Image (spheres, rainbow, N blue to C red):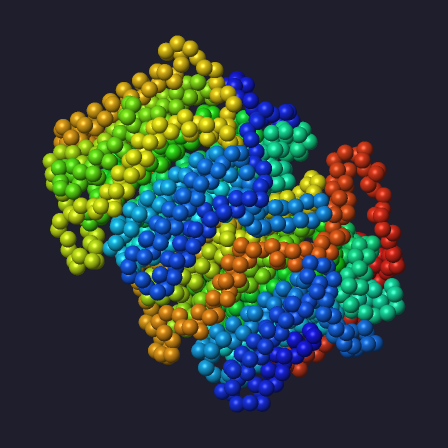
């Protein structure tokens, strides 16, 4: 079933290529709508909601000698993200109807190709297939920015491409290393994610140390394991994508220059590839390293939350403001992931959905303004609610959802991420973690900042005395306020926001099992860490804890890595 | 000071960490019936949706107002029915909200109602006053028919929904929902005149300042969840009644003791206390019914409600309640001094609200939750009347609010009811002996200052008495200026569109406004007789205090006996001063001000008071401006350091490396020869010294 879902947009692309340009929009809309309906049907057919298992699996061989396949399957989290993707796609197509007037064929075929790639990322159960899809998202986005972007598009698309590509190359090296390790141990190559995950967990028994003593100075003093290296490699790929401070600078640029549909997809889905990668690969593959390094990653996310929030405050360009706010918001999402407890992960996964809905909608709203006035400068407009009441209503609504007003979707995820982080301290008997109250308390200041920059933006643009930039003469087809088409884009998103805000229950229950599975390696490791910390404090306990870890190491590479070090 | 604390701890049965506590208020049991109580929440939502539909259809009639009044009224009657059916505290489950379970733990925060007497006390006046003020607004907002009328009533309805969630929720997360919800409703309604930049700025300020408090609430909530494993009141109270076990206390360390301070921060934000009070005076930019309902009677008392509801938690630190008392007392004094020097009557009332809220917090801190809650109850009525009369004046005089420009209202035709209801409300505010409700509720609090032992509580009592004097002065300054004296007026500069241009004559309030004024005044009178009832309400809830201090004997021994005398004489003194300066001899006030201003030594006093002690400016200089600067700086860092230098720099590294060798490719044969020779030499050197180099590298590791 899933391969069919991947094929639908591709069939659309082929159809677009072989028909006149005037049909491109209709075909794209049909294909994406069909894909959405089909994925909803799949959602009903999917019988693994609430469990950790993968459903709708399909096995398609590819390069069998290397164990590479096109295997697909979805667990509940992937299924939700697939639904988010396919939901946003028709909206993006529908939303570009008036904005894109030239090169229709290219635009809509790239949109459909990116849909296939994004869905492919979420449903791949083979690492190479995952990686191919992961990289495949870059090319359509590159062209969407390069062909349909704003003034500075050349720089934006190249930076976006090279930056994220470099990151994911390093991640690929990490993946290949794990696969090679597994092949070395068992003699067979495979890229099955499940198998490699357990192989990667064994990497903790391969030490990696580098000590350089130069003229009596300890220049390098590294004592880690191969698993830490894998963590670093994967982080390089996914942290750029999320993006995590300080790897975020491609994002404001790419967002500002991309066409509306591109920005929406970028914010709603492409950034989620990063967090999904963290959830699906980093957490299960490198549990020992994560337990040790989670505080550092958390500190980076907290810096990102506060740093970008303050930057948002001084922006004049609405789109840039929302782009930066994405960085800030995703900081909460990453923080929740590294809380390593069910609350934090629930919050984080829901954050992926909710951020997709509300920030996607905000980018749509900015696009609608841009289409009318051809400016996004906050200082050139004011009091738009006088002439655009419907637009203003939605703007305020989605800003509130983004600010995390309880009763809307943003609150649920932000609340869960923060409470997860807060309770993730070593001394928490219910579910120990490596973060704790201070992390959440400092990140919580981001809540205040978010209210500040978003409401100041709303205060400038939506309220106040009316000041309108000159209406762009090209746009005679658009009414002053939103057209029926535009309302029909925002309304489903708004309804979902309210629904998730009041009934998160179905969602949290659906992803429970998957989260439990991802978290399964953690409690034991965190406890071990807690005991080690204790031992550091009280020497009498030290003897108890210096015994090697319970699982016996499969220690094949000790000599080789020693040499390498 | 610690000695005082010890005494304080012994006066009430403190919930000492690691020991059995002897709190024994009834805790709610879950029941399955009474789901109909949920309609208290759903009717306002229904009303909001109806108003939304009216907004979409651009209804020009009063349908939104009548629907709102009807639905809110029904909500009030359901509350009354709930009160009638009440026998013991219950929780009523409506639907699951956040409900996450895993092996070994859970986070349960459902849409459930916690109904005990504290809830009912609050809900009765919230829904009752909400209905009456919506009725008042139906006339007051007439000028906006078809423009913002539906939007206004949708906001009022949403506010009632959020406030009901806040008061009735059975867990802290639902309280948080209501807490931010009322904050948003307040944002919505303060910014009602959205084309006025001052209104937009005020709305924004209210929301953002409140968010600081909200963060306190959120962190308090997380801490409670962290240490008690639950956010539901029933479970939390059960644990607290059994006493915090030594293990939790030890694990909690100092952090568990921070909880009361975080909750306090939240309460100070919502209830406009130091240091977060600055948003409330600005909030007067909203339409007057909003000021009356949200910023005087109901929403701003949410902080008092929170501390009453969480009273057992507030005892986790022995200094928490004294802090509350002191902050309340100081806020009361500060706001009163500012109120004395303002000319805008609505702002004076706003400062008066802050000041009275200060009394309420003082009451909580002084361990008379009954006094605090009773003062909330009486204050809700008389302050609503005060605001609504201000609103009637503003409505009639085209936005005129300057007390120097309207005078002798009571002699004018059609303004009698306004003048005399305002007089009664003023009397209540100053605590006029016997006939006013404020007399009974405020004295409870002030007397308690001389009963409860605590750090500097006697001095606090003195401050309270001083504040009572100031209150009497500024209250009657308004009344004597506006309602008494010779009749003269100047119209304001806001003109209703429906009058087609400039208005020269004031129009007296219509029957609806007059009816509401009288009705709420009747409520204020009734609240005098409800003291005993309110006491029983508070004492059977989480705000229960078993023993608030030794009851001293003898007239001067028992502050409850002499305080009414002292407070009334102080109040009458303030009234007399106001009478002298603002009715009998109005010029004296101006000459006194001129005198103070002419003397360089005293010039600062009226200047600072009129400029609200420059608190806004100080906040701006200390917090907002530096943060903005940091924002600009970070943006620069992001653009130039992180992006240009680091990212682009690394990106350009290959190109630079290419450039570095560019001179070598200069096309001159000799130089190629030289570089070739050099290259060969380098390779040879490398080969020769490689083993040594490797050894050195290896040896280093």
Q: Position of residue A203 (x, y in %)?
A: 80, 57
Is B287 placed left or right of B257 in the picture?
left
A432 vs B311: above or below: below
User: Does residue A156 appear in this view?
Assistant: no
Is A119 placed left or right of A175 in the picture?
left
Q: Position of residue B446 (x, y in %)?
A: 38, 23
User: Does residue A198 appear in this view?
Assistant: yes
Which residue is at 50% across, 20% downward? B547
Which residue is at 84% across, 62% downward? B691
Of the 4 image quadrants, the one containing the N terminus of chain A is bottom right
Q: Quadrant of residue B228?
A: top right
Towards the viewer: B630 or B553: B553
Of the 4 image quadrants, the one containing the C terminus of chain A is bottom right
Residue that extends furthest to the top in the rendered view of this protein? B554
Q: Position of residue A292 (x, y in %)?
A: 72, 49
Which residue is at 70% across, 40% downward? A429
Q: Position of residue A115 (x, y in %)?
A: 60, 74
Q: Quadrant of residue B301?
A: top left
A195 vs A444: above or below: below
């Amino acid at each position: 079933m899933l391969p069919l879902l991947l094929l639908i947009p591709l069939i659309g692309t082929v159809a677009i290529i072989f028909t006149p340009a005037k049909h491109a929009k209709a075909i794209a809309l049909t294909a994406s709508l069909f894909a959405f309906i089909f994925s909803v049907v799949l959602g009903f057919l999917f019988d693994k909601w609430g469990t950790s298992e993968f459903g709708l699996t399909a096995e398609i061989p590819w390069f069998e000698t290397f164990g590479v396949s096109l295997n697909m399957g979805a667990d509940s989290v992937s299924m939700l993200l697939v639904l988010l993707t396919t939901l946003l796609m028709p909206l993006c197509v529908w939303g570009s109807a008036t904005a894109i007037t030239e090169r229709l064929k290219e635009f809509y075929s790239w949109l459909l190709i990116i849909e296939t790639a994004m869905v492919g990322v979420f449903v791949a159960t083979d690492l190479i297939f995952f990686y191919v899809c992961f990289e495949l998202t870059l090319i359509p986005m590159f062209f969407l920015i390069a062909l349909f972007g704003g003034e500075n598009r050349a720089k934006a698309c190249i930076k976006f491409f090279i930056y994220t590509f470099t990151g994911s190359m390093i991640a690929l090296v990490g993946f290949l290393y794990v696969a090679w390790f597994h092949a070395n141990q068992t003699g067979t190559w495979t890229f099955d994610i499940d198998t490699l995950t357990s192989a990667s967990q064994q990497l903790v028994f391969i030490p990696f140390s580098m000590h350089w003593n130069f003229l009596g100075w300890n220049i390098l003093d590294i004592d880690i394991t191969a698993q830490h290296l894998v963590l670093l490699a994967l982080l390089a790929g996914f942290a750029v994508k999320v993006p995590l401070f300080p790897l975020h600078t491609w994002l404001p640029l790419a967002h500002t220059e991309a066409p509306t549909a591109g920005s929406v997809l970028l914010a709603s889905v492409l950034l989620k590839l990063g967090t999904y990668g963290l959830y699906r690969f980093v957490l299960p593959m490198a549990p020992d390293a994560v337990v040790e390094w989670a505080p550092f990653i958390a500190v980076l996310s907290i810096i990102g939350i506060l740093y970008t929030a303050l930057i948002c405050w001084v922006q004049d360009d609405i789109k840039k403001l929302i782009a930066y706010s994405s960085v800030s918001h995703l900081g909460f999402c990453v923080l929740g992931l590294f809380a390593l407890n069910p609350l934090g992960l629930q919050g984080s996964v829901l954050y992926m959905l909710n951020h997709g809905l509300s920030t996607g909608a905000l980018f749509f709203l900015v696009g609608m303004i841009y289409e009318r006035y051809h400016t996004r400068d906050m200082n050139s407009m004011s009091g738009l609610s006088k002439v655009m009441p419907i637009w203003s209503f939605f703007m305020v609504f989605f800003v509130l959802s983004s600010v995390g007003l309880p009763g809307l979707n943003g609150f649920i995820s932000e609340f869960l991420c923060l409470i997860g982080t807060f309770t993730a301290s070593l001394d928490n008997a219910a579910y120990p973690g490596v973060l704790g109250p201070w992390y959440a308390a400092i990140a919580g200041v981001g809540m205040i900042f978010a209210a500040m920059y978003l409401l100041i933006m709303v205060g400038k643009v939506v309220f106040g005395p009316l000041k309108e930039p000159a209406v762009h003469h090209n746009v005679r087809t658009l009414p002053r306020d939103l057209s029926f088409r535009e309302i029909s884009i925002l309304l489903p998103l708004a309804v979902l926001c309210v629904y998730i805000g009041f009934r998160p229950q179905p969602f949290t229950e659906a992803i429970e099992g998957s989260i439990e599975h991802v978290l399964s390696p953690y409690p034991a490791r965190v406890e071990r860490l807690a005991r080690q910390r204790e031992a550091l404090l009280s020497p009498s306990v030290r003897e108890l804890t210096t015994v090697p870890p319970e699982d016996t190491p499969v220690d094949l590479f000790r000599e080789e890595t020693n040499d390498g070090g | 000071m610690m000695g005082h604390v010890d005494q304080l701890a012994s006066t009430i049965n403190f919930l000492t960490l690691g020991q059995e506590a002897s709190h024994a208020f009834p805790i709610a049991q879950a029941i399955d019936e009474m789901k109909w109580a949920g309609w208290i929440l759903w009717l306002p939502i229904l009303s909001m949706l109806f108003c939304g539909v009216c907004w979409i259809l651009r209804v020009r009639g009063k349908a939104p107002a009548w629907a709102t009044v009807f639905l809110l009224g029904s909500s009030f009657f359901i509350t009354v029915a709930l009160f009638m059916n009440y026998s013991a505290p219950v929780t009523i489950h409506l639907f699951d909200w956040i409900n996450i379970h895993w092996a070994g733990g859970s986070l349960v925060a459902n849409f459930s109602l916690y109904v005990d007497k504290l809830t009912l006390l609050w809900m009765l006046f919230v829904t009752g006053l909400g209905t009456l003020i919506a009725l008042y607004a139906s006339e007051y907002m007439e000028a906006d028919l078809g423009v913002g009328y539906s939007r206004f009533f949708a906001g009022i309805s949403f506010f009632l929904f959020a406030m009901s969630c806040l008061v009735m929720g059975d867990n802290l997360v639902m309280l948080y929902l209501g807490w931010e919800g009322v904050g948003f409703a307040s944002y919505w309604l303060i910014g009602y005149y959205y084309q006025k930049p001052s209104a937009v700025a005020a709305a924004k300020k209210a929301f953002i300042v409140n968010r600081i408090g909200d963060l306190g609430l959120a962190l308090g909530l997380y801490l409670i969840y962290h240490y008690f494993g639950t956010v539901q009141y029933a479970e939390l109270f059960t644990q607290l009644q059994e006493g915090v076990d030594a293990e939790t206390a030890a694990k909690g360390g100092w952090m568990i003791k921070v909880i009361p301070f975080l909750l306090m921060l939240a309460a100070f934000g919502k209830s406009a206390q130091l240091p977060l009070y600055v948003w409330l005076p600005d909030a007067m930019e909203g339409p007057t019914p909003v000021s009356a309902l949200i910023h005087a009677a109901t929403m701003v008392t949410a902080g008092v409600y929170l501390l009453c509801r969480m009273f057992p938690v507030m005892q986790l630190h022995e200094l928490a309640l004294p802090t509350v008392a002191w902050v309340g007392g100081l806020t009361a004094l500060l706001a009163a001094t500012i109120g004395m020097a303002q000319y805008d009557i609505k702002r004076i009332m706003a400062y008066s609200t802050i000041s009275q809220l200060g009394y309420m917090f003082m009451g909580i801190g002084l361990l008379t939750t009954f006094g605090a809650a009773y003062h909330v109850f009486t204050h809700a009525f008389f302050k609503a009347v005060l605001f609504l009369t201000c609103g009637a004046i503003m409505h009639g005089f085209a936005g005129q609010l300057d007390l120097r420009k309207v005078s002798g209202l009571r002699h004018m035709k059609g303004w009698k009811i306004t003048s005399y209801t305002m007089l009664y409300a003023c009397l209540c505010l100053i605590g006029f002996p016997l006939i006013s409700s404020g007399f009974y509720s405020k004295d409870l609090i002030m007397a308690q200052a001389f009963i409860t032992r605590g750090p500097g509580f006697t001095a606090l009592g003195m401050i309270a008495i001083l504040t009572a004097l100031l209150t009497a002065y500024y209250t009657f300054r308004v009344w004597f200026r506006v309602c008494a004296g010779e009749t003269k007026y100047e119209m304001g500069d806001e003109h209703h569109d429906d009058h087609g241009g400039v208005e020269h004559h004031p129009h007296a309030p219509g029957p609806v406004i007059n009816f509401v004024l009288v009705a709420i005044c009747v409520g204020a009178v009734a609240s005098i007789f409800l003291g005993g009832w309110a006491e029983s309400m508070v004492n059977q809830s989480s705000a229960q205090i078993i023993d608030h201090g030794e009851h001293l004997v003898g007239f001067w021994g028992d502050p409850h006996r002499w305080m009414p005398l002292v407070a009334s004489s102080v109040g009458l003194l303030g009234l007399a001063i106001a009478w002298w300066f603002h009715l009998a001899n109005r010029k004296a006030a101006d000459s006194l001000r001129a005198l103070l201003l002419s003397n360089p030594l005293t010039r600062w006093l009226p200047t600072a008071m009129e400029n609200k002690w420059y608190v806004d400016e100080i906040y701006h200089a200390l917090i907002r401006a530096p943060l903005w600067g940091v924002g600009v700086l970070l943006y620069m860092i992001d653009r130039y350091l992180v992006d240009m230098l680091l990212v682009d720099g690394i990106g350009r590294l290959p190109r630079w490396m290419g450039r570095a060798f560019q001179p070598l490719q200069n096309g001159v044969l000799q130089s190629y020869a030289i570089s070739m020779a050099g290259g060969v030499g380098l390779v040879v050197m490398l080969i020769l010294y490689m083993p040594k180099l490797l050894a050195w590298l290896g040896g280093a590791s």
